[in-house]
Image (spheres, helix red, strand yellow):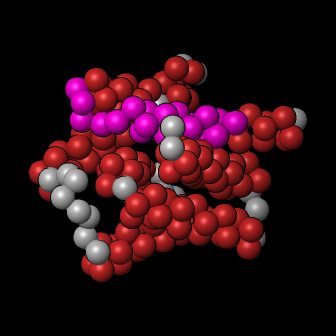
Amino acid sequence: MEITEIFIIVGYGVVGGSLKYIDIWYDNLKRDPTLPIYASAFFAGILMGVLMVYDPLSSILLLSIIFATGICGRIDNLSFRIVAFSSLFLLLITLIIRPFEDSITITSYVVLLLILTLSGVLDELLDEIGDKRNIKVLTTRPVLKIVLIALWILNQYALLYVFCLLAFDFCYYLVSLLSRRKVS
């Protein structure tokens, strides 16, 4: 495994953990955000933007997460808007200056983005059902992982991105677990 692949995997983990940290702040602490929360949001957004700028397949995966959460109304506070805006702004500015190279066609990009976004929307809907009915497996957002593995098997995505998504989710759930221990 190359150093760039390790950076990408770690980057996804940091973004996942940061998003859960922000989520916990708004959901559990019920206080007005402070500068560290906004800084965390900005940092997570810039890191997402860097990952998307660096790699077209990362941009598809991370855009699908942004789009799915946006469609489902989960970008529901200023910090999440900062994450989404800063990452999208960085991606758009960079694409204006230097478009993606021919590593992926526009058609493939759009098709993969639609597939992963729909998977993410389904995950968000199942997460709500899982929360209401206390079905834990649905709250792990399994659809996007399963679809990404299927795309890897079909040779449409590299195995690296399966590990990236697992790192994202692992750190997301790790922050959740650590926050429960600290609160209780």
Residue at point 26%, 48% (across, down): 113
Name the residue: 55% across, 48% down: 3
Near-viewer residue (20 or 166): 166
Point out residue 34 in the picture as x, y percentages from the top left corner.
Answer: 75, 70
Work out whether 169 lies above or below 49: above
- Of all residues, the one furthest to the front in this rendering is 2
**Residue 97, position as x, y percentages in the image:** 30, 80
Query: In this rendering, would 114 be left or right of 33?
Result: left
Point 30% across, 37% down: residue: 157
Q: Residue at x 22, y 53 (%)?
A: 103
Judge whether residue 90 can be spotted in this image: yes
Q: Residue furthest left?
A: 107
99 falls in the magenta region? no
Q: Is residue 1 above or below residue 62?
A: above
Using the rendered image of the protein, determine whether residue 83 is visible from the camera's viewpoint. no
Q: 94 or 20, which lies in front?
A: 94
Q: Position of residue 71 (x, y in %)?
A: 35, 52
143 displayed left or right of 9: left
Q: Is 98 rendered above or below residue 72? A: below
Q: Main secondary structure of the magenta part?
A: helix
Question: What span is in magenta?
Answer: 154-174
Q: Is residue 88 above or below residue 126?
A: below
Q: Quadrant of residue 147?
A: top left
- Residue 165 location, x and y as percent? 48, 38
Q: Quadrant of residue 53?
A: bottom left
- Residue 168 magenta-drawn? yes
